[in-house]
Amino acid sequence: MKKSLRRVADWSNRNQGVLTLLALIVAVYAALPFQSLNTSAANTFLDKVVTVLAYDLRIPVYLVIITLVIVLLYILFLRRRYLPQLLTLDFLSGRWKNTWGTPGNGGSEIALITKRGEYFVDDVQRFTVEDFKYDPTKKTVTFIKVGLTSWDNRKLLNTLTLENNELLVGTEQGYPIRYAKLP
């Protein structure tokens, strides 16, 4: 139950703008002045039918407009959420200074990452970068560094925040790590 309530609260917080817009649309709809039907100006039966149809059409037209706005917002939300990846593995290609751990208890290395995901340190390929993903809504990059030798069969999950195109900060298997792009 708590988990469901937490999900609803998280969804509400993420979609606060959409919910506010929906509330405004409902408020505008409620404030629309629907006058009573006045057919006294209609002389013929056909004029009365047109007057009734015109009045009855006002309500559905507003509902259609409101529905179209809601559908459009929902489509835009889905499109923004599931945009094709803006960054690919090519983003990582180049030289990076990789710093891990905490000050006094860590290390650093200069790594060269190729467009094919090969991870070199001191001209020796140590890892292969696999399963690269970019989430534009959270600005996070995730990938797995897979060791290549029989004595190094590690699979290190990197979860990084894109600070800018030159800096990635986050964790590698729970330990702090930082990638700074070098010229």
Image: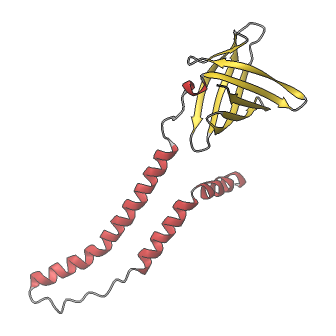
Percent x, y for residue 16?
58, 60
In the visual, does 180 lie left or right of 137? right
**Vertically, is 80 above or below 62?**
above
In the visual, does 4 lie left or right of 171? left
In the visual, does 101 lie left or right of 110? right
Q: Residue furthest top?
A: 150
Q: Residue at x 25, y 79 (%)?
A: 55
Q: Residue at x 57, y 28 (%)?
A: 91
- Picture quarter with the C terminus: top right
- Picture quarter with the N terminus: bottom right
Q: Residue 150's quadrant in the figure?
A: top right
Q: Residue at x 65, y 58 (%)?
A: 9
Percent x, y for residue 64?
33, 65
Q: Nearer the viewer, residue 49 or 154?
A: 154
Q: Residue furthest front?
A: 183
Percent x, y for residue 48?
15, 84
**Vertically, is 32 above or below 60?**
below
Q: Nearer the viewer, residue 119 or 59?
A: 119
Q: Nearer the viewer, residue 21 or 71?
A: 21
Percent x, y for residue 80?
49, 46
| Color style of the picture | secondary structure
